[in-house]
Image (tube, rainbow, N blue to C red):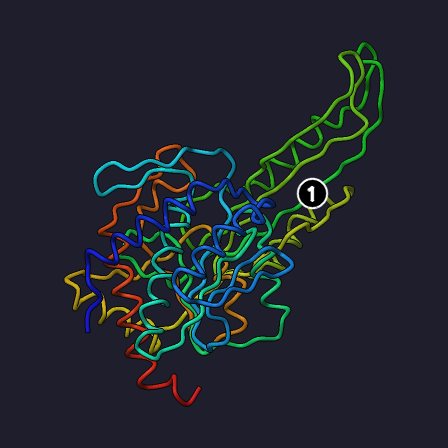
Amino acid sequence: MQPEKELLQQKARQILLKLASVYTPSGSEASAKEIMKEISEDLSLNLKVTESNSYYLNEGSSFLLASHIDTVPGFIQPKEDGQYIWGRGVVDAKGPLTAMILASWYLKQEGIDVSVAALADEENKSRGARELLSSGKKFDIIIIGEPSNTTDIVVEYRGVAHLDINCNGMAEHASSSKDNIILQTNEKLRNVVQLPSSYDAPSIVPTIFKCGEAYNVTPSLCYIHLDCRFSVLSNFNEILERIRAIFQDCKIDLVEYVPPAKTQLNDLVKSLQRSLLTLGVKPRLVRKAGTSDMNILTAITREILAYGPGESKLEHTNFEKINLEEIYISVLAYVRTMEDLWKRFGKTS
């Protein structure tokens, strides 16, 4: 039986406006606690709040729909405009989260238990996903709720590494200096930088460069931050060794590492493709240049992908808006995919 469209869209509007009304930049996810309690009680889905301030609804299933509750900074007052909801996070990723909550609610009425995770800190260091990873739990199926234009199935993300580099120099009066760490460091940067060119070609991009303490004194220290991106075809150790060779007289700290992730054309991917086709949507398999919690949670499931409503080009902008029709289609896609997989795997998982 197909969920009734008007009812689902009405509930989607209510839930999304509630979620968007609470400002939850990374680190402030606790602000959503009361709203999540209201949603939990209204839909009769049990709620669990973890130490990272991640929220779990209907916890306990081996099938997991996982999105995130945090947003980038900058509150935008939510508003309605016809079928559109505007506001910070309605695309990334409270819209996908809303669709996942409604899918779990509907499936529970059919006797199918699917858990929902609203993970914390995805826009920062992914504390929520890392907390789940370290919990020891395993899942048969995980769908990551990220905006993918309602049509795209994300099967691959690049990895990322963040490096802090500190290079020491000799502080001298500018009028008589013989040594300048700015020039030396700049030459090293020119040799190491690889600007983004293609998906599989690794990129090494400087995002912070700080040198100098006074107008008339050459610096004694230069600090550089490098953002490195790489696909599953790259060997990060080789990338790191190259950077170390060029900056061999500098101190290098690896401050964050997230591996690349790629899923195969598995049962989950095929089932979601079929579900979208039955809804009149032509699905595409896509690769994302950034990262998501999929990169981390790949380690605890046999099948994973990312899919959700919302235009990905609106992520992190001041123009986030999402159409209730997109959410409705995504709810049906989640429901039909979970129904299909539950018949084949759920009862024995």
| x and y, in percent, of residue 268 in the image | 34, 74
Q: Is residue 105 above or below residue 110?
A: above
State which quarter of the image contains the C terminus: bottom left
Secondary-structure class at tag 1: strand
Q: Decide if residue 192 is on the left or right side of residue 214.
A: left
The furthest residue to the left: 280
Q: Is residue 233 above or below residue 321?
A: below
Residue drawn at x 37%, y 55% as measured from the top left? 98
| x and y, in percent, of residue 44 in the image | 41, 66
State which quarter of the image contains the N terminus: bottom left
- Few, some or many residues within 10 Å of mark 1 (<14, 14–19, 20+): some
Residue drawn at x 46%, y 52% as measured from the top left? 201
Q: Is residue 248 above or below residue 76?
A: below
In the image shown, does 43 or 225 lie closer to the viewer? Answer: 43
Q: Decide if residue 54 is on the left or right side of residue 20.
A: right
Residue drawn at x 17%, y 64% as measured from the top left? 279
In the image shown, does 188 or 260 lie closer to the viewer? Answer: 260
Q: Image quadrant of residue 220?
A: top right
Q: Image quadrant of residue 40?
A: bottom left
| x and y, in percent, of residue 126 in the image | 57, 54
- Under mark 1, the amino acid is Asp
Q: Decide if residue 178 is on the left or right side of residue 140.
A: right
Residue drawn at x 19%, y 63% as measured from the top left? 4
In the image shown, does 92 or 60 lie closer to the viewer? Answer: 60
| x and y, in percent, of residue 346 in the image | 38, 83
| Pointer 1 residue | 164
Q: Decide if residue 306 is on the left or right side of residue 208.
A: left
